[in-house]
Amino acid sequence: MKFVNVGFGNLIAATRVIALASPESAPIKRLVSEAKEAGRAIDVTCGRRTRTVIVTDSDHVILSAIQTETIANRLGSPEDGSTEEDPEE
């Protein structure tokens, strides 16, 4: 199973990711709000600003402080990306 680093030592299963989105739009804000109310939101930002919202096939919503493009590159790379250092962390 391939895991992807989503910041601060947190890993998620790459095969479970459905979408990566910026948290700026109203529909994504609504999605995050509904997930928090339902207990399906996982915040791995460690108190930092949310830069990526990750939607999984289990309807969980993961909030990450890593840029969307960085996570997308890690998902697309042949290695797991978990050993890369990100200057934003």
Image (cartoon, rainbow, N blue to C red):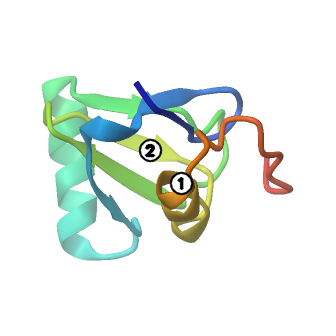
Give x and y (percent) for residue 14: 39, 39
Mark carried by residue 50: 1
Q: Which residue is mark 2?
A: 63
Q: Residues within 10 Å of mark 2 (few under 14, many from 20)?
A: many
Amino acid type, residue under disc 2 in the picture: Leu
Task: Residue at 79% x, 56% y: name it.
Answer: 88
Q: Name the one closer to the observer, 48 or 68.
A: 68
Task: Residue at 17% x, 69% y: name it.
Answer: 27
Q: Earlier in the sequence, mark 1 or mark 2?
A: 1
Q: Callout 1: helix, strand or loop?
A: loop
Question: Which quarter of the figure has residue 46?
Answer: top right
Quick check: marks 1 and 2 in contact, CB under 8 Å?
Answer: yes
Q: Name the one closer to the observer, 66 or 36.
A: 66
Amino acid type, residue under disc 1 in the picture: Thr
Q: Is residue 52 above or below residue 1?
A: below
Spatial distance from mark 1 to mark 2, Cα to Cα?
6 Å
Question: Which quarter of the figure has residue 60?
Answer: top left
Mark carried by residue 81: none
Q: Quadrant of the N terminus?
A: top left
